[in-house]
Image: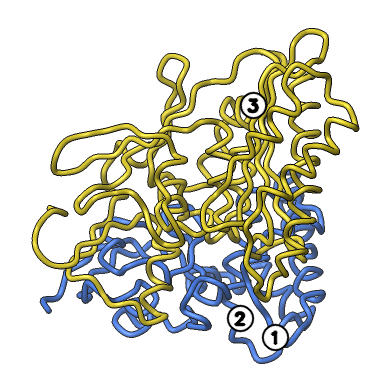
Chain colours: A yellow, B blue
Amino acid sequence: MLAGDGDRKVYAGATDFIPQLRMGRPEPDYAVDLKRIPRLTGLRLVGDTWVIGAATPSIRLTEEETLVADLPGLVEAAALIGSDQIQSRASLGGNLCNASPAADSVPAMVVNEGRAVISGPNGTRTIPVASVVTGPGRTSLAKGEFVVEIEFDRPPARTADAYLRFIPRTEMDIAVVGAGARLSLDEEGRCVSAAVALGAVAPTVVRVPAAENALVGRPITDSALEQVAAEASAACNPIDDKRGTKEYRRQVAGVLAVRALKLAASRAANSTR
Amino acid sequence: MSSTPVTATINEDQVEFLCQSDQTLLEALRDVVGLTGVKEGCATGDCGACSVILDGRLTCSCLVLAPEAAGATIFTVEGMAGPDGLHPLQQSFLEGAALQCGVCTPGFLVAAKSLLDRRADPSESEVRYAIAGNLCRCTGYDKIVRSILTAAEDMKKAAEEKEKV
């Protein structure tokens, strides 16, 4: 259906789709609502993998207690997308494919190494969430393809994630900087693996391997975190806009990455899994 | 463009209406069904004036395409007052002067009802988060927050009275 002639678009909650049409984006010839496809709206645990339908409203994630316990940072990120009204509609798949550099859920999906299951005229393929967005408003999806679901492995023992967003108020704003973090600790509290991803500081979400390497094999000390902050700031390639200058975003990215890591570390240390 | 027939349950009544596929639920409710309590503010999901409860979830009707309402259960501000008079939220908004121009009021009432349906005894902070998706340019919000808290108390007392009888 999506592969035919003319401009054909899919939508989930339409919380970006309809406003974009209002802003003057050309109306597609066909708009296909994905929410009536059962596989796309719902979430389930298959073995040790969470499978989240791409059009599942964010509020459903916050209602799933086991998911909140497994991936609290991912759920927090999804819960930051807009008001209660928007939470009833906005989805991980939509937030990803809208391809805004400031999308809140994407850094959290990236640190958890989420996988996007993509369906299209040539069948189904699975790629890392990190390879879906190629630039502001652009994705690697071909014509006729759409994201069906997003998969996350349940975290191993002493592993946890976190997502923090910086905005000048407490609710209802677009990220100046977003920081996702995930850590695994060993029994002595040393870092076994780390992931840091930043949003709103570059055309796409950026992973910061240099910051991750600064932590692995060591306890989470202030000096290690200082290095993380410096690496996170250095990894940014931000723009100046009304939300913040380049310098400001770089500075905030370092601070926020450290705070997200500290939160993930305390969760990992207290994890019961 | 051909019209799409839609059957939905609106404020407990089965309603059939014809809509265009590029019409929003907000436009259909106002212009076709005649429920003008649903207001258009921004039409981009920011202001909450068009809030309805769609299949149990608080939703901006400006972000829903009208054909999506097929088979849905919709609650609007018109469904709030009962046979015995105003809903406690409406009464406390009136008494607490929680409105001036009134355009945002239906959206606030529906958002507040959605909160109290889920949480009978919310804190002030929970109330403020629950109405974060509703904009009011007149009142400064304080009287709205107080009126919602008062209505919650009134409803709790009424429920306790009912239990005693």
Which residue is denoted by mark 2 in the rendering? B104
Question: Could you tell me the amino acid type at mark 2?
Answer: Cys
The amino acid type, in three-letter code, at marker 3 is: Ala
Task: Give me the residue at 71% from left, 47% from top.
Answer: A164
Residue labelled with disc 3: A69
Left or right: B78, with A9 as reference point: right
Query: Which chain letter goes with mark 1?
Result: B
**Residue A124 % position (x, y):** 22, 34
Which image quarter: residue A259? top right
Q: What element carries label 1?
A: loop
Say whether marks 2 and 1 touch (CB < 8 Å).
Answer: yes
Disc nearest the viewer among 2 and 3: 3
Give the CA separation, mark 1 to mark 3: 39 Å
x and y percentages locating residue B159 in the rendered image: 71, 50
**Label 2, label 3: how many angstroms apart (C-alpha)?**
37 Å
Quadrant (top left/top right/bottom left/bottom right) for the N terminus of chain B: bottom left
**Residue at 71% across / 90% down in the picture?**
B100
